[in-house]
Image (tube, coloured by chain):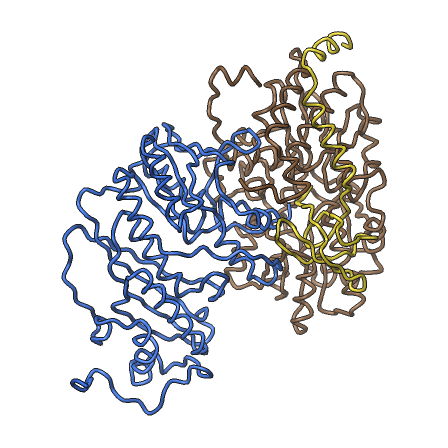
Chain colours: A brown, B yellow, C blue
């Protein structure tokens, strides 16, 4: 589209390199078997669909969507709680754009609640929430914090800054979740009745923070290879090739394709910050995966005065899924969006029933937006792939 | 995971841990609170207004070279390897 | 000197354009409102029909079919790089009128002003409208002004209604796209939306990108003269190229296949969209159009467009084909294929 002004982005979207890699992948994929690769991270789901990477893969290779979409795995009851904070306690609730349209209970959402008069603001950065708190000294400002380990350090910074500045009207509603436990749950349930997997494409930016070391358990305990994959479509393809090679050679280890941003140790500074302001929760509910032990973070005791859950207690509701919504199964990789009866009938982006359709990384949204109809390839093209 | 984009540091202020980065001519302020030793000219990954990590130009080049090499390999070579290795 | 101008009452003093602000009296129908209209609106937008000072403007309908379009403009901020609500209101409605092949004739403009709007800003807006009208030679011939209380309007809302005339023999409509037709776009996409977003403080990015707001009547006239067989014209405003192509596909009952590499996008627009997690295909344009014409005329149409200053970067971006599901598909720069969907709601910057 444009003349390549974005370094470290454009080079990794090169169509010519993609075609050549596609040929190599097709040549090395063993036609006698299937390859089922879980792309754990919602960002990868999005990239695969947006660039049409699946079209460049051989027919016996399938990407399975994982639960690495923090919007999708946030339980409805947590959104209900956030809405209640805004409505019952009259706080100014600061949220990332991704959450605005996610359906909560009783057909509510943050966007609808805002339309109904609640003070809900969309922010791009935790710094925006701090700025709002400084500007509105008389109001209570709550940061609705979500995300995996990529988005957690920015919340940690906000907590420290708020403490340092004595921002008494600022607090955080913490819903940060951890990647390795989710991965473990998926792999534990893998098998004939669960999702079938041959390898994992590891998340790009979570890994820049946590490093590659935390994935060692995957080959060790589950015998599956992991390749930590960069964010761009060429990264995804190269990582796919690396997984195919491991699978073919029956070896399994943790490989890092995203070496330009991921190291074995990760970002120590960010890790230290997180360790200071957060503590592990014994258990946390994940939409679709149930209650997972040690899978999420709460605010550490030393920072309890900045914990919105303590400052604004809200009775957590049941959080009702809409009947027929199969988000939980889609998140676990056991169902495709099209297997859900609501997909495309009742559940569309205009009228989403579950988070998988609202979040731009959700498998249902990605499939609807990008992959809903595939033009049948003429015979000549199919032979090349 | 999550949208993080590489951008180049144009200016920085160590004291306030703030920097201005540029991506394709668009300038944006970001926080350097999560990164040590950043310098003007470095590329960093930007996510929700923060620099997460530096991007290594050497590794980026190496990765691209590997991708190019993987695309250059003769398909026939691997047909033999596969049946051999089993 | 001529006969005394009886349509003009005399006022105690002049409007204080530098320090004054709109207040409720300006909308009450009394002297204050008359003065506002005289010294601000009529002075700048001035033309014979407006000067008559009636509640309506009379004109003889020209030969041909009349085209009418109306649009409310509620943009915020009122002033942005490359334009303002005033010229936007003129360009936008002229464009809507000409997309059926009409020659634009007149505009009507209704203003809803918020109490407290500085008169200096209102003056800027009206002057900008006047300049846009003069450039396009499409005058505002009648108008209305109301004032709402502070807090009940975003400074200024403008509704413009446009009238144009379509010559016989021209048949340009959203339902006329046919399999085999070529799809063209008149220039780079996403400029306007990015220019607006760059003014939102909490997104905090700086860019040189300016809105592309422009009246396209002269471009359309040149296009129709060269290729009267154009099937469809539409300007991709809110919702961007994606929404407009989908609308046309639905209306015409066809599918479309476009090529990402062919779509012009300025590097800065692409970069801003990357940073915010937006897709340029979904970002608004205010000075661009989509044209669909029979394939055999595509090159000629492209040449005519590129020769025009408002379409230097015009490009053929795809084809129409038969598709019972009416999808718009895109061959990505990467080589894969994907659907180009239209937005469910407003595109929001995302973290994931």
Towards the viewer: A67 or B42: B42
Quadrant housing residue C298: top left
| Residue C87 location (% of width, % of height) | 39, 63
Q: Quadrant of residue C128?
A: bottom left
Q: Position of residue C223 (x, y in %)?
A: 31, 44
Quarter occupied by residue C198: bottom right
Q: Nearer the viewer, residue A196 or C45?
A: C45
Q: Does any portion of residue A365 appear in the rendered image? A: yes
Q: Position of residue A10 (x, y in %)?
A: 63, 39
Q: Residue at horizontal 28%, vertical 62%? A: C138
* Viewer-closest of A265 and C59: C59
Q: Nearer the viewer, residue C247 or A278?
A: C247
Q: Does A271 sit left or right of C265 as displayed?
A: right
Q: Residue at x 84, y 26 (%)?
A: A220
Above or below, C45 against C287 in this view is: below
Q: Residue at point 85% right, 60% down?
A: A302
Q: Is residue A379 left or right of residue A271?
A: left
Query: Residue A10, relative to residue C114: is it above or below?
Result: above
Q: Is residue C294 above or below residue B50?
A: above
Percent position of residue C292, x then y:
34, 38
- The quarter of the rendered structure image containing the N terminus of chain C is bottom left
Q: Residue A330, can we see it?
A: no
């Amino acid at each position: 589209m444009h003349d390549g002004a974005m370094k470290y982005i454009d080079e990794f979207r090169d169509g010519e390199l993609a075609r050549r890699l596609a040929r190599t992948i097709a040549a090395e994929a063993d036609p006698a078997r299937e390859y089922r690769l879980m792309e754990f991270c919602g960002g990868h789901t999005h990239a695969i669909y947006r660039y049409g990477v699946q079209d460049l893969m051989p027919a016996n290779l399938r990407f399975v969507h994982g639960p690495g979409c923090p919007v999708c795995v946030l339980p409805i009851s947590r959104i209900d709680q956030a809405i209640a904070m805004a409505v019952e306690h009259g706080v100014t609730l600061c949220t990332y754009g991704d959450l605005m349209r996610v359906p909560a209970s009783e057909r509510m959402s943050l966007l609808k609640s805002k339309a109904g008069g609640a003070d809900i603001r969309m922010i791009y950065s935790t710094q925006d929430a701090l700025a709002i708190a400084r500007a509105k000294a008389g109001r209570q400002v709550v940061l609705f914090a979500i995300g995996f380990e990529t988005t957690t350090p920015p919340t940690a910074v906000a907590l420290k800054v708020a403490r340092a500045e004595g921002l008494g009207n600022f607090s955080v509603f913490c819903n940060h979740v951890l990647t390795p436990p989710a991965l473990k749950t998926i792999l534990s349930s893998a098998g004939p009745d669960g999702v079938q997997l041959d390898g994992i494409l590891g998340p790009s930016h979570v890994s820049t923070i946590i490093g590659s070391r935390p994935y060692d358990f995957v080959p060790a305990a589950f015998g599956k290879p992991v390749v930590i994959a960069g964010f761009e479509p060429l990264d995804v393809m190269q990582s796919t090739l690396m997984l195919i090679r491991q699978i073919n050679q029956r070896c399994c280890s943790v490989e890092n394709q995203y070496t330009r941003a991921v190291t074995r140790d990760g970002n120590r500074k960010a890790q230290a910050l997180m360790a200071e302001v957060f503590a592990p929760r014994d258990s946390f509910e994940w939409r679709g995966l149930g209650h997972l032990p040690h899978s999420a973070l709460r605010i550490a005791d030393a920072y309890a005065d900045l914990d919105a859950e303590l400052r604004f207690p809200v009775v957590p509701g049941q959080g009702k899924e809409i009947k027929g919504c199969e988000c939980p199964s889609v998140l676990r990789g056991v169902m495709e969006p099209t297997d859900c009866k609501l997909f495309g009938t009742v559940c569309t982006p205009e009228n989403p029933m579950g988070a998988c359709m609202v979040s731009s990384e959700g498998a249902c949204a990605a499939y609807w937006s990008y992959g809903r109809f595939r033009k049948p390839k003429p015979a000549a093209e199919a032979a090349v792939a | 995971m999550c949208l993080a984009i590489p951008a180049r540091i144009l200016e920085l202020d160590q004291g306030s841990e703030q920097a201005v980065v540029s991506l394709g001519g668009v300038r944006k302020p970001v926080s350097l609170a999560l990164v040590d030793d950043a310098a003007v000219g470095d590329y960093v990954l930007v996510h929700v207004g923060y620099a997460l990590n530096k991007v290594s130009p050497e590794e980026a080049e190496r990765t691209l070279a590997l991708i190019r090499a993987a695309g250059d390999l003769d398909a026939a070579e691997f047909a033999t390897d596969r049946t051999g290795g089993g | 000197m001529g006969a005394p101008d009886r349509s003009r009452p005399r006022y105690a003093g002049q409007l204080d354009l530098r320090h004054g602000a709109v207040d409720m009296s300006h909308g009450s129908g009394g002297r204050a409102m008359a003065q506002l209209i005289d010294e601000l609106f009529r002075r700048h937008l001035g033309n014979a029909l407006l000067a008559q000072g009636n509640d309506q403007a009379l004109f003889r309908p020209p030969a041909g079919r009349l085209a009418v379009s109306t649009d409310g403009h509620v943009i915020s901020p009122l002033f942005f790089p490359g334009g303002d609500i005033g010229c936007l209101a003129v360009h936008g409605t002229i464009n809507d009128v000409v997309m059926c092949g009409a020659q634009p004739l007149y505009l009507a403009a209704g203003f809803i002003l918020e109490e407290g709007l500085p008169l200096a800003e209102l003056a800027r807006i009206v002057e900008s409208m006047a300049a846009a009208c003069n450039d396009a030679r499409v005058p505002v011939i009648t108008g209305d002004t109301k004032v709402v209380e502070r807090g009940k309007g975003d400074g200024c809302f403008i509704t413009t209604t446009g009238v144009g005339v379509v010559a016989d023999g021209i048949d340009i409509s959203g339902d006329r796209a046919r399999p085999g037709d070529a799809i063209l776009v008149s220039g780079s996409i996403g400029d306007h939306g990015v220019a607006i977003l760059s003014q939102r403080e909490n997104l905090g990015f700086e860019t040189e990108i300016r809105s592309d707001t422009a009246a396209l009547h002269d471009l359309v006239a040149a296009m129709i003269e060269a290729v009267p067989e154009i099937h469809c014209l539409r300007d991709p405003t809110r919702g961007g190229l994606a929404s407009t192509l989908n609308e046309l596909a639905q209306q015409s009952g066809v599918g479309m296949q476009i090529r990402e590499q062919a779509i012009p996008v300025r590097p800065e627009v692409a970069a801003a969209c990357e940073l915010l997690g937006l897709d340029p295909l979904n970002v608004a344009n205010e000075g661009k159009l989509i044209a669909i014409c029979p394939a055999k005329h595509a090159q000629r149409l492209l040449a005519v467009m590129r020769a025009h200053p408002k379409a230097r970067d015009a490009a053929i971006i795809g084809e129409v084909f038969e598709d019972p599901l009416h999808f718009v598909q895109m061959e990505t720069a990467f080589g894969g294929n994907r659907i180009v969907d239209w937005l469910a709601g407003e595109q929001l910057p995302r973290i994931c």
